[in-house]
Image: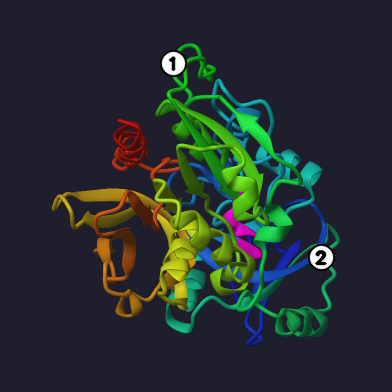
Amino acid sequence: MSLGTTDKPTACLALADGTLFYGIGFGATGVTTAELCFNTAMTGYQEIMTDPSYAGQVVTFTFPHIGNTGVTPEDDETAEPVAAGMVVKWDPTEPSNWRSTEELGTWLAKKGRIGMGGVDTRRLTRAIRQQGAPHVAIAHDPEGNFDVEALVAAARGFKGLVGLDLAKDVTCAQSYTWNEMRWAWPEGYQPQNAPQHKVVAIDYGAKRNILRCLASAGCEVIVLPASATAEEVMAHNPDGVFLSNGPGDPAATGEYAVPMIKEVLSKDLPVFGICLGHQMLALALGAKTVKMNHGHHGANHPVKDNTTGKVEITSMNHGFTVDSQTLPEGVIESHVSLFDGSNCGIEVAGKPVFSVQHHPEASPGPQDSFYLFERFADAMAARKA
């Protein structure tokens, strides 16, 4: 049990095995149940909290300085936070950044998300690594009154992410177009006014910066809900199809996504997938996915591009992975994690069809993998030529 910085803890994290962590609550009050993961990124806590891929998860940040740059609407990856809550070592301080418009705790309270500081996050991270991502209940009560037995029972009652289709909960309600490009100094976000390619993006929980990267690569982007059919996709006469990131068990989402992707693949269009989109493509090609022990979450993950031999430092966020042993003939493993050897990318031999597990849009994270968006644009240009 880890105590916070006062004699009266106002937050409690209960693991399903009965382990308790106490600390200082901030943000919203109440109780939330979820899976617990840890993220090793040193920047981008706001992007992480608003990343739809974190649906159903509480995030432990291994970097202690969380909240010190405040929040700004420009950094939201979707309209509202999606992660269930956050656990940090030190209580967020008053923000010191010229872009900040609000304090992290105030923002979390408005958005209904619980934060918890004063926790021994090293111990918590070791527990996750050794035992796997646990089911937890996180509670914030300013009076410090906790029914510990009820919290442990709530954690044990959480059903987990296996078999859960969360894409349907975070996808867009209807189609829309996107033309905003990546942020650049000093203009900020600028529109794409001269697109060269038309891309249909399937929204399984798409991050805004992915759509911006597509626009910056010269694409007019039409975003469709996760449930879109192949007929709806092809009705837009796209030059290419993009499969977005998203949360949950890929096998569950694949029940309706895989038939659509298979039909799109028969049209010989360039196809590019990221994260859950990578897993969806792999399933459509005949591979399988498995749940990882604690997943990959951070902005410092080394990945090797087998097609070039180049090693990239990447941003990661996934709890399921493609089983490389199940890749069918003609599907090449294009990228691999240098942390644990797990699959990080595939491509179809002789076709402009590829995907990666990591997040090349660098939000948060390094920009080593921006070239993948250019590779997708080049594939569409080559097909038209």
Counting from the top left corner in percent of width and height, residue 68 is at 55, 37
**Residue 101 in the figure: left or right of residue 120:** right
Pick the front one: 192 or 7:
192
Q: In the image as oriented, which residue stretches furthest toward the top?
A: 186
Q: What residue is rendered at 62% in x and 37% in y?
A: 76
Q: Residue 221 occupies which quadrant of the picture?
A: top right
Pick the front one: 278 or 239:
239
Label 2 sits on residue: 144
When the figure is inspected, residue 219 is found, relative to residue 288, above or below; the finding is above
Counting from the top left corner in percent of width and height, residue 273 is at 44, 52
Amino acid type shown at disc 1: Trp
When the figure is inspected, residue 282 is found, relative to residue 301, above or below; the finding is below
Label 1 sits on residue: 185
Quadrant holding the C terminus: top left
Amino acid type shown at disc 2: Gly
Range of residues picked out in magenta: 49-58
Q: Residue 230 occupies which quadrant of the picture?
A: bottom right
Q: Which mark is residue 265?
A: none
Label 2 element class: loop
